[in-house]
Amino acid sequence: QQQVKQSPQSLIVQKGGISIINCAYENTAFDYFPWYQQFPGKGPALLIAIRPDVSEKKEGRFTISFNKSAKQFSLHIMDSQPGDSATYFCAASGGRGSTLGRLYFGRGTQLTVWP
Amino acid sequence: GAGVSQSPRYKVAKRGQDVALRCDPISGHVSLFWYQQALGQGPEFLTYFQNEAQLDKSGLPSDRFFAERPEGSVSTLKIQRTQQEDSAVYLCASSLATSGRGEQYFGPGTRLTVT
């Protein structure tokens, strides 16, 4: 059972546009929600993360929006650039009775930004 | 180089062979995770170490998989009698937090191909 569901599977955006990737989770015990960026042949790199006590977090061009009641969170990439073309993964961790730091990943979104 | 390193980067094994994959975490990081990433999928948890103690091995897919971290630093993931379904990228991540919560830093991964 997929603990974190991610959409869309692929996304094509024009340079300068906004990229939006969505994730949903079921386990209300999750309390840490990171986004990772992965380039081909590389390991995932932490981009930005949020905890459920805030509804939004912004770092540069990247913003996480978090809706606790809907159990959803999303990544917004403003002014998307060709260098942002990569696969993006949402993830979640936390909860009792399990390894607290264990990350549950979504299936990934392949983002292509056209110049 | 302050990041997580993994070796070898690529490994080709014939079915039935044993393989050993190495992870060098960031110095001082207490927590160490192994994940398996199949082609086109998000990483999936395999096992977790806090220092030298393996606290969670619930993600290991079979008893052919074995991991160790004898001195609380370098870790080795061993796969015995490899099968074709073991072909994947094996990622190691380390974290400063004792519980493993918070930021996890990933290595570049080892791509295992079983022929």
Image (cartoon, rainbow, N blue to C red):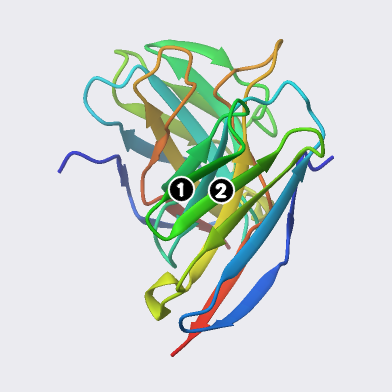
Image quarter of the C terminus of chain B: bottom right
Which quadrant would residue B58 be assigned to in this image?
top right
Question: Mark 1 = which residue?
Answer: A58
> Where does the image place residue A104, in percent across and percent down from the top left?
65, 37
Residue A108 against residue A34 in the figure, above or below: below
The image shows residue A45 at horizontal and vertical percentages of 40, 50
Q: Residue furthest front?
A: A55
- Identified at 78% across, 37% down, the residue is A71
> What is the CA distance from the residue labelled 1 to the residue labelled 2?
6 Å
In this view, the residue in front, B7 or A103, is A103
Observer-nearest of B93 and A6: A6
| Residue A65 at x, y percent in the picture | 62, 47
Asked whether A70 or B43 is in front, the reply is: A70
Label 1–label 2 contact, CB within 8 A: yes
* Residue pointed to by mark 2: A64
| Left or right relative to A32: residue B49 | left
Is there one chain holding both mark 1 and mark 2? yes
Specify which label sits upstream in the sequence, 1 or 2.
1
Classify residue A33 by image quadrant: top right
Rate crowding at label 2 as few (under 14), some (14 to 19) or many (20 or more) other CA atoms within 10 Å.
many
Identified by mark 1, the residue type is: Lys
* SS for dot 2: strand
Q: Residue furthest left?
A: B1
Left or right: residue B63 versus residue B111 is right
**Does residue B12 appear in the picture of this structure?**
no
Say which residue appears at 82% left-offset and 34% top-offset. A26
Which residue is at 53% across, 36% downward?
A50
Label 1: state its secondary structure. strand
Q: Is residue A67 above or below residue B27?
A: below
Q: Residues within 10 Å of mark 1 (few under 14, many from 20)?
A: some
Outermost residue toward the bottom in this view: A115
Quadrant of the image for the N terminus of chain B? top left
